[in-house]
Image (spheres, grey):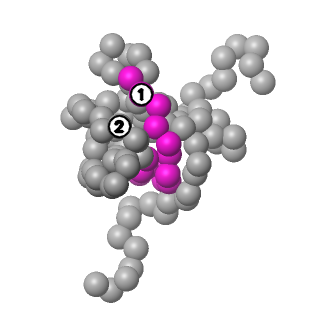
Amino acid sequence: MDGKEKRRAPRSKHDSVIEIFNVEGKVACECRLIDFSQAGASFFSGVPIVMPDRFRVRLRFLDKGVLEAEARVAWTRRQKNATRYGIVFDSLKQIPPADGAE
């Protein structure tokens, strides 16, 4: 291995929440975000999640606001007490604040 970064976009670490939506459009689970880039993210869950081929996620950041993405799982890694997931974004958009919100 040459040690060079192979990701399409630089990632930054985040200690935030990622919401994963089911096919009905309701939050199916909330997981702990590990890192994030414009191309994808990784997160972990203490309970294994059955992930569909494609799904929608919402990320909330203090500095970026709320982002929503259509995503798919790139990899999973089972650890001792959790499962770590890597996802790729098919689309990513910023959600404007609700009327009256600041």
Observer able to see residue 88? no
Look at the picture and state if 30 lies above or below 8: above
Residue 18: % across, % down = 49, 36
Q: Residue lying furthest left in this view?
A: 53
Note whether residue 96 is visible. Answer: yes
Question: Quarter holding the N terminus?
Answer: bottom left
Q: Which residue shows up at 32% across the image and 86% down it?
A: 2
Q: Which of 19 and 78 is in front in this view?
A: 78
Closer mark to the observer between disc 1 and disc 2:
2
Segment colored magenta: 28-43
**Mark earlier in primary sequence (1, 2):** 1
Q: Name the residue under label 1.
A: 29
| Label 1 crowd bin: few (<14), some (14–19), many (20+), radius 10 Å | few
Principal SS element in the magenta part? strand
Q: Is residue 24 magenta?
A: no
| Kind of residue at disc 1 | Cys
On the picture, is 95 further left or further right than 3?
A: right
Is 68 left, or right, of 28 in this rendering? Answer: right
In the rendered view of the protein, which quadrant contains the C terminus?
top right
Left or right? Give the position of 88 relative to 100. Answer: left
- Spot the residue most to the front: 80
- The reply to whether dot 1 and dot 2 touch (C-beta < 8 Å) is yes
- Determine which residue is flagged by label 2: 47
Q: Is mark 1 on a helix, strand or loop?
A: strand
Q: In which quarter of the image is residue 62?
A: top right
